[in-house]
Image (spheres, rainbow, N blue to C red):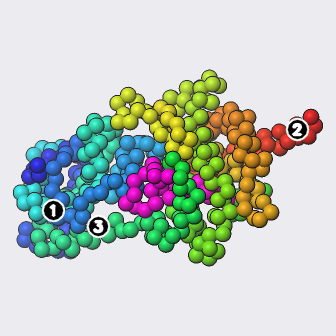
Amino acid sequence: MTITKLVLRPAYARRLPDPVFTTDPAIYHHIFWVPAGTLVDGLSYGPNARNPNTRKQVYKKVDESLMNVDCLANSFHLKNLGIAINAHSVVRIADDHFEINLPDAEYHGVLNGGHTLDLIVKRIQDGSIPPSQYVKVEVRTGVPNAWLPEIAGGLNTALQVEDMSLDDLAGYFDWIKDTLEGESYFSKIAWSENDQGEYDARDLVSLLTCFDIGRYPNDGSNHPIEAYEKKSKALDQFRKDFENNNGAGYLRLRPIMKDILVLHDTIQSEFALVHNKTGGKAGALNIMDTKNDNSRTPNFNFIFIDKQAKRRLQTGALYPLLAAFRWMVESDEDGNYRWRGGFEAVQLRWKEAATELVRKTFERSNELGGNSNAIGKSRTHWDTLHQTVAFRDLMSKAKAKSA
């Protein structure tokens, strides 16, 4: 049922007159910082240019941010544009109590941010939104009804077709699809913005970038930090590789791509086990995501190895660990990439070095206040883990020769 009154109890509120238009009634912009968990369902989407479709893969990321999954805690309001509402009037009932009047569903309701509101409402039904999570709500009053279609259309240009969707349309991901088709997890990968999936094409490109020894040679100090720090840059590199080189650079990774995905899930799922075996408490680590009994799904899915677990390492801490095994990649006689000693050697190297790699990640986490994002951007940490795998591999070979 569409509501005609919305009650807001914001932490902060401001009212600003429009800087340009002098209409009667006057146009005002009411800005509120509202606890996300206090919003309600039932707002009209009449003025909006489109109804929300939160099945898009991109909104999985928005939802994770709302739920403090793998991100700086309680930063949702800094990364989200918020919700814009057109209303008839705003009445201040008390210092922290405002009543938003929405008598006409055709003109009063959500102008922009419908996807944000829809995600929040679904989480409210779970009762699981962190209490310190805020969202900006801007309520506009006095806007002539005739202006609304143009205003709503302009606001919604932020939801343009994503670069990933255009790359999919251009066929850039076709070789990845061909390689992975037939795998049990293939249907769980999103290729364009309207697809559903546990991972999307940007994730796969970022993971491949972690092992690109052509762009990030093992004998240098340059590491693929943008694979984590800015996936859009990794996707740009992937696109330019196709536009300028028919994809020859990334195609070299095709022989080891499936193994990369297995290694990704292996490290992410086993980190907690290794940490606990050395006397640690993975459940107390800020760099771990943990499912509780009240979660909608009881476990995290590791689709590339077909396993589930209560805990998983956050991606900021995972990517430097994963990319450290770039040391195990070499070129074959045709210029394609392969594992030195085969993938079995890579898995063995993880087992041998896991305790040390986990310890160094734990120590770096303590130094950075348990901030997974900071770990993922630490160039020193990427270099340290890469050197650790290199040292372990060289020592193993030296022992084998002397045996």
The numbered mark, 3 or 1, whose residue comes first in the sequence reads: 1
Residue on which disc 3 sits: 156
Residue positioned 68% across, 63% down in the render: 252
Q: Against 278, is 378 above or below? A: below
Residue at image coords 50%, 29%: 283
Q: Is residue 131 above or below residue 80?
A: above
Residue 373, position as x, y percentages in the image: 52, 47
Image coordinates of residue 105 in percent, x first then y, are: 10, 59
Q: Quick one: label 2, few (<14), some, or many (20+) residues within 10 Å? A: few
Q: Residue most toward the right?
A: 402
Q: Position of residue 162 (x, y in %)?
A: 42, 66
Which of disc 2 and disc 3 is earlier in sequence? 3
> In the image, residue 17 lies at what x, y percent?
18, 65
Q: Which residue is mark 2?
A: 400
C-alpha span from label 2 to label 1: 71 Å
| Residue 156 appears in view | yes
